[in-house]
Image (tube, rainbow, N blue to C red):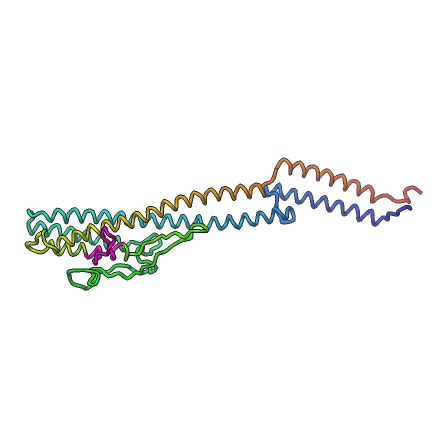
Amino acid sequence: MSMRISTQQLYNGGTSGIQRLQSEVYTLQNQVDTGRRIVTPKDDPVGAAQVLVVTQTQAVNELYIKNQQTATTKLGALDNVLGGVGEELKNIYDNALAAGNGSYSDSERAAVASELSERLKNLVSLANSQDGTGRYIFSGFQSTTTPFALSANASPYSLSNAYMSYSGDDGVQALQVSASQNLETSVPGSEVFMRVKDAAGNVTGRSMFDAVQNMVNFLKTPGASASSATYTQALGDITASMDNVLTVRAGVGSKLSSLESISNMAADQKLQYKEQLSNLEDLDYASALSSVSQKKLQLEAAMASFTLTSKLSLFDYI
């Protein structure tokens, strides 16, 4: 049984073949121009789905990396301020201890008291430190509120009759630095400056500021004796304040160390995701260019063949 092929069938078949080859050349050329094997999902549906998953996971990892960088900055600033507080307290302690020497005159103790007053101002300034965005470091969640201000109370000072009032809260700020970990990036001023703990972990009943101001007032008192309970208590409170700052700072240091490990892991994951995307998307240029040349030759042959075929007619042979 013979099959008849009409002129229309020849025309449709020829144009269809040419259009298919043109589409293939266009796709290959797009891949070469972009350097990517998958330009549109139809190029590789399964591969495109995998690219989407990896890209989304990569984007989440980038957010974690940004949070890690922010956390590093915040904890680094906190550590620096705590270091400054520790240095001021050490100077205050050394001067207060020296002033307990029985050979000191009233005027010499008064001079030490003046120096301690200046260092106390420095402590208050450090306690009211702000970060690079203008937010107060030690205000807890009330980061736009100045945490410490001079009270109107009279000495002797204690937590129930504080020298400095605290306007922040006990909130601890945190950032999610990995899929499974939130990292605390702040310490409330109440923990560092107000609720000072002794070596046994007990709250002394006086703030850091109370301790220093009580010592200043004692040294200003004519005939003050280092054997008095007032001096012993004030010096002990200053010692407890130093220990308390060291403890808080050690906690910040451990968080920085943990954050470094988390950041290193996130950086490794970033490289892994980049490699996965490269394996899925990157184009084999040598193979692609060879395919482009091959398809162009096929297209030229098809167009030439179609041109000749479309001119055929029985009338040419009559």
Residue at the spot 36% in from the left edge and 44% down from the top edge: 257
Q: Main secondary structure of the magenta part?
A: loop
Most extreme residue toward the bottom is 152
| Left or right position of 69 against 1 | left
Q: Is 77 a magenta residue?
A: no
Q: Picture quarter containing residue 168?
A: bottom left
Q: Which residues are magenta?
A: 192-210
- Front residue of 260/40: it is 260
Q: Does residue 291 show up?
A: yes
- Front residue of 11/285: it is 285
Count of numbered tags? 0
Q: Does residue 143 show up?
A: no
Q: Is 193 a magenta residue?
A: yes
Percent x, y of residue 274: 52, 43
Percent x, y of residue 240: 21, 51
Percent x, y of residue 72: 37, 48
Residue at the spot 16% in from the left edge and 63% down from the top edge: 154
Percent x, y of residue 192: 27, 54
| Left or right position of 133 against 60 | left
- Front residue of 303/67: it is 67
Residue at the spot 54% in from the left edge and 47% down from the top edge: 54
- Front residue of 10/110: it is 110
Q: Quadrant of the C terminus?
A: top right
